[in-house]
Image (cartoon, rainbow, N blue to C red):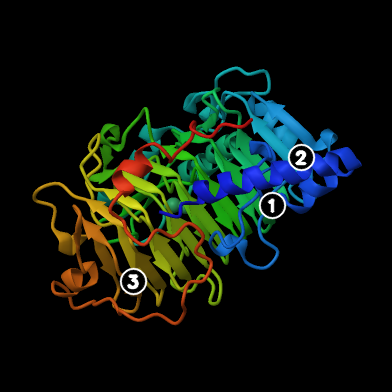
Amino acid sequence: MASASHRRSRRTRRVLAVSTAFVVAGAGAGFFVMNANAGGIDLYHQTLPAKDGWAASGSGTSGGAKADSAHTFTVSTRAQLVKALGSASDTTSRIIKVKGTIDANTDDSGKKLTCADYASGTGYSLSAYLKAYDPSTYGRSKLPSGTQEKARAVAQAKQAKNVVFRVPANTTVVGVPGTKAGITGGMLQIQNVDNVIVRNLTFAATEDCFPQWDPTDGDDGNWNSNYDSVTLRGATHVWVDHNTFTDAPRFDSANPKYYGREYQIHDGSLDITKGSDLVTVERNRFTNHDKTMLIGSSDTDSVGKLRVSLHHNVWKGIVQRAPLTRIGQVHIYNNLYDTTTLNGYVLQYSINSRAKAQVVAQNNYWKVAAGQKISKLLSGDGTGSVAGSGNLVNGTTTDLVAAYNATTSKKLKTTVNWTPTLTAGLQTSAKNLPTELATTTGAGILSGG
Ligand code: CA
Ligand code: CA
């Protein structure tokens, strides 16, 4: 087993020995900067190891590793986080250490804000909104417009101003070990910037107070929400490592239905869209969620981009989009899919390959409960590919594509237009993943702060 952590520990010993010599010579700091992806460096300065997925290509991903002390922050409140993030267009390297749990739904003095606080003064009320756009009177042919929809948008913008955190280029946002570090109710927005690291954080309860009704979405209409816990839009070189994503404590099973449709307050956990490229998503836990990960937001999102590596993640108690892929070259390896129903989250499918996505799914492990149809683990529109081998279902080598294709006319293609080469830590067998990933994934297990 050649796991990344094993390689890192070997490097640690070597680098520590060498760096001692440099410190004696008075050049230790320079050495560390040049070799920032080696071990022996604290959690906050670590960078993506060489060849560790698509984010390692080209200039690699170092986040804020070069930050000076004036741009190294420890934050414990929303206001402190906003201040540390600074301007979205400032490219100065920065490290932001999150200590404890930050509640995004708080004001600058730390006072808790509720949905009613955001709605206050806007004229919006859910009951008035429901009355205004009831399909029996408003119809189903057009989006809501008029007084209540305008008021809803104003209230939503008030919440967005509070809960959306724009992350600038050359930034590391990282949880301080042992502090239950994370963000509740917020969205990290990594948009049109390069070189960002997000590590060791729990993202929970990202909720939209003001879902919008769209009667034209699907056959029956849908309630749509606005916030992903982490969203990448036009972002490049992003490493998302050792985080936990969950809807807890309020699960979708608590959502009411209006107009016969679920009043969905959640959007994605981690969406990678609008021409984002060169992303590595590694050793995260995705739990208790429906629309977990989009790669590409439409079938015309961005040709030639959306290159993403997903490895050693745990997907447990999720409904769909793990991920939903479009267009890009996506390597999905050594992940654990536990499809057991959790807190009312019932699996629809794990991986969807559509809009000519070029997916290589290799050496993943599906742990499925009795009665779970193997043919339902994949999905597609008939143009996407899923290549790869070594995937296990309850320990047995299984051709998931063949199982899926036997039941549908929208068959997955089995060849892709690329061969993954940035595959650090790739394990040639999925056999040990259930045991190994139980203790090596998610927020709160990294140390070295
Ligand atoms: Ca949405
Ligand atoms: Ca989204």
Residue 380 spot, x, y in % from top left: 29, 70
Q: Do the residues labelled 1 and 2 touch (CB within 8 Å)?
A: no
The crowding category of the residue bearing disc 3, from other C-alpha atoms within 10 Å (few below 14, some 14 to 19, many at least 20), is many
As helix, strand or loop, the secondary structure at mark 3 comes to loop
Q: Is residue 144 above or below residue 273?
A: above
Residue under circle 3?
A: 388
In the shown orientation, is residue 414 left or right of residue 247? left
Please report the residue visible at 40 percent of the width from the left and 62 percent of the height from the top. 332
Given residues 165 and 183, the one toward you in this image is: 183
Instruction: Tell me the CA gap for discs 2 and 3.
Output: 43 Å
* Labelled disc at residue 86: 2
Residue under circle 1?
A: 62
Callout 1, which amino acid? Ser
Which quadrant, please, contains the N terminus?
bottom left
Callout 3, which amino acid? Gly
Please report the residue visible at 27 percent of the width from the left and 35 percent of the height from the top. 256
As helix, strand or loop, the secondary structure at mark 1 comes to loop
In the shown orientation, is residue 391 left or right of residue 52? left
